[in-house]
Image (tube, rainbow, N blue to C red):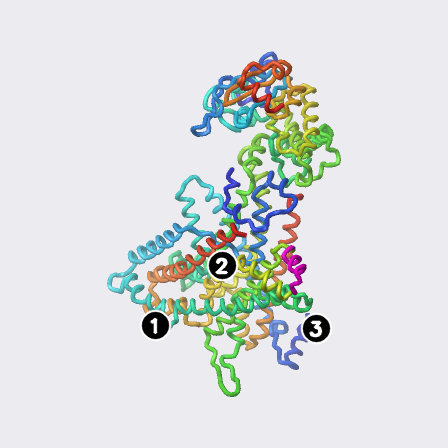
Amino acid sequence: MVALDHKGMSDNRTAGTSDEKVFEVLLPVARQQRSQAMIERLEGTFRLNLHPHHAIWMFLLFILAVGTAHAQAPKELISPIDALIKWSPFILWGPEGGLTGFSLNIIISFFAMLFGTIAGVALGLMQISLLLPVRTGSWIVTQFFRNSPWLVLLFTIMLLFPFEIDLGFVVIPIPDWMKAVIGFSLPVMANLSEVVRGAVRSLPSGQWESAESLAFNRRETLWMIILPQCFKRMIPPWINWYCILTMSTPLCSIMGVEESVTYTAQALNAEGDRPELLPVFYVFLLLIHFIYTYPIARWSIQLEKKFAIKL
Amino acid sequence: MASPSQSGNGSGTNWTPDQPMVSIKDVHKSFGDLEVLKGVSLDVMKGECICIIGPSGSGKSTLIRCVNALNDIQQGSILVEGLEVNDPNLDKLELRKKVGMVFQQYNLFPHKTAIENIMMAPITVLKQDKDEVAEHANSLIKKVRLEGKENSYPGELSGGQQQRVAIARSLAMSPDVMLFDEVTAALDPETVKEVLNTIQELAEEGMTCILVTHEMGFAREVANHIYFTDFGLIVEHGAPATFFDDAKDPRTKEFLSQIL
Amino acid sequence: MELFGDYFKQLYDTSGWNFVIFYDQVEWQRFVEAIWTTIKLIIACLIFSLIVGFVGAWAQGAQSKIVRNVIAGYIQFFRNTPPFVQILFFYFVLGNLTPSYDAGGYQEAYIGSFGWAVISLGFFAGAFNTEIFRSGIEAVPESTVEAASALGYTRLQSYIHVVFPLAFRVCLPALNNNLVNLLKTTTLAYGIAVPEMMYTANQIWSDNVNVPEMMIVLFFFYVGLVAILVYGMSRWERSMKIPGYG
């Protein structure tokens, strides 16, 4: 039966309710898919499902773009391939290796992930607090930032955050890319907050009860028993969120942050905006993002499969 | 050879009630390299109820799935009221109007209520009038003793109840032959009885039935004829009394001694 | 309406909070048009992504290995590259290659920025929908299809009456997740100057220097839209739930 071969069968993480028997007869995969959808709804992201041969398709597209561009290009001007070779260091590292361009995308993604994770874990733990106001407050914050478009959040921070902070004795300048870091860390925070809450809730209540019967207090139970167990199952969605974050960093080119998209536009401009250069440069841009994200997404799937068996 | 383009219940075939209603001759069937049926022949007369028994993997389920053209066959012939099932130009709708089938796993449509499950096929497939179908469906619900469960969804019914809905769903097509493929195998022991009772009543009313079953007591009571299959062949067959008490073949004996 | 406008005018005079869209007729018009554009954009993307999903899922069941690989490549491409760059790619690269017509002195493309936003976002969300629909169809057991064919259903009839209604119910939750994501992603159309809410808000705050006020409006607008969609979808999910199955 086709249905039983479905990849998801092995990594069902929330199986085991009373009506299992009846369900298995009729719609064997359906419930698993529903619970998968619920996990994804909670974590706010899809599982990326990748195979190595998919990378080949990306390269074929690139070659196609270069090929058509070559055919179109006038002979007396610099050829698209030469233009790309000339400009690719600029798009990747910025002028004189100034850590702008695509490397700035990565730097932004690192810092946004760092701040987003710290804030997200804190917010997530607040969501499971015993104090109702803390729980409600953190829930509202989480939902608010989860359900706002990233671009709106980014605009808010870019436009409303001061460009420098005066601490009286020292003035700290805040460059645009650092504001972008804050702007991106907000949705990451909110989504990771839900990941934490979901992971804690997915543990059987017996863990809490047995810890309580062994006279652990709540803080000890959380840090010594619950969170270590949740840690593993939070890793795959965490990596997944990193991929999504990285793929969102080009957004800050709208505000003129000097990352890969901004520099691609500048490079094209410097070459006189020749239409036959457009496909080559934009496919190159897509390609470098793909090359960076792809191994990470694959890694997350492998980890998930590995953990799914052990859990 | 039958004329498949005719419509109506078997009106266009040259079949007469004195001929076997289902006639299976030298049927061979393989799944890849695995030969499941190695030349099976049997006849079922109108109003007869036959049981096919045998160890798992002996090809009994495959055989009755072939009767309904759910599996194709490589060699041989299956005639249902004169309709050749092994004909590549077979009108499958014509065949399936004659042959009803009930499955081990009920296979009800879970998004439809019991009564809708029963009414769906006559309306969409046979294009029958909705009110007539509803009337028929209600009488079938009564027949399988599920009054009050008309508007329950399959997921809300027990296995035995679901299986009886499945029987009613097949009957709604007014078939001439009913195939039962291990219909009690997936059921809890306490609900097996209610399903068997329903089938027994059908058989007693004169419905032509072909059953694949592991319920030996039931087979003995209901069947007119028992066929024992092993390794894709009919090893032995006979009337229930002689078959169960006076089996000749050593494989039959061994099987019966294990199961009884 | 008068009273409403007066209140916000007064608010501006007394506190300096300038919700210009609520008392200035011209800005109000701009705002309402942006609402319509946004909703049109969302619905168009939604429909297009569903069509892409159907076709993609159908093509993934094709016999030809080449067709299946092309679909798999498409899915991976759109899932693993930045959607914002995708939009730019569609608009600038493909928009450049598609024909245009003479609209009285200047060249007007047949597909404008709105069209490219729909195509690009539709393909982006469609990549996810393809996977969702495929897994939904896979969730319907072969034996249920068999039961339908034993009842005399043709292949098409069993698809219409059994496989599709069941598969749809199975994939509805995942589909809803994707549609909520799509709603938020439509703001990326800003990048190619589609006059939707994000873009219009930017224009309004540029003209009126009221960034914080417009930000508040933006948040209310989008969080509100998401809330309405989520509410509607979860009601729909509940009504479509197959009774007796968890």
Location of residue A276 by image quarter: bottom left
Both marks 2 and 1 on one chain? yes
SS under mark 1? helix
Subunit bearing disc 3? C
Is residue B91 visible in the rendered image? The answer is no
Instruction: State the image coordinates of residue A53 (x, y, percent, origin top left).
Output: 39, 50
Depicted B102 relative to depicted C126: above or below: above
Please name the amino acid that badge 2 sits on.
Asn
Outermost top residue: B18
Vertical relation: A46 (above or below) A87: above
Q: Main secondary structure of the magenta part?
A: helix
| Cα separation between marks 2 and 1 | 29 Å
Q: Position of residue C99 (x, y in %)?
A: 39, 56
Q: Is residue A90 left or right of residue C186?
A: left
Q: Is any atom of residue B211 visible in this view?
A: yes
**Tag on residue A97?**
1
- In which quarter of the view is residue A120 placed? bottom right
The answer to if C178 sits in the magenta stretch is no
Label 3: how many Cα within 10 Å (few below 14, some 14–19, many 20+):
few
Q: Secondary structure at mark 3?
A: helix
Name the subunit of mark 2: A
Q: Between A262 and C29, which is closer to the camera in this rendering?
A: A262
Q: Which residue is mark 3?
A: C3
The disc label shown at residue A240, or none: 2
State the residue in front, A238 or B121.
Answer: A238
**What amino acid is labelled 1 in the image?**
Gly
> Circle 2 sits in a helix, a strand or a loop, which is it?
helix
Image check: B195 left or right of A261?
right
Read off the magenta span.
Answer: A206-217
Q: Nearer the viewer, mark 2 or mark 1?
A: 2
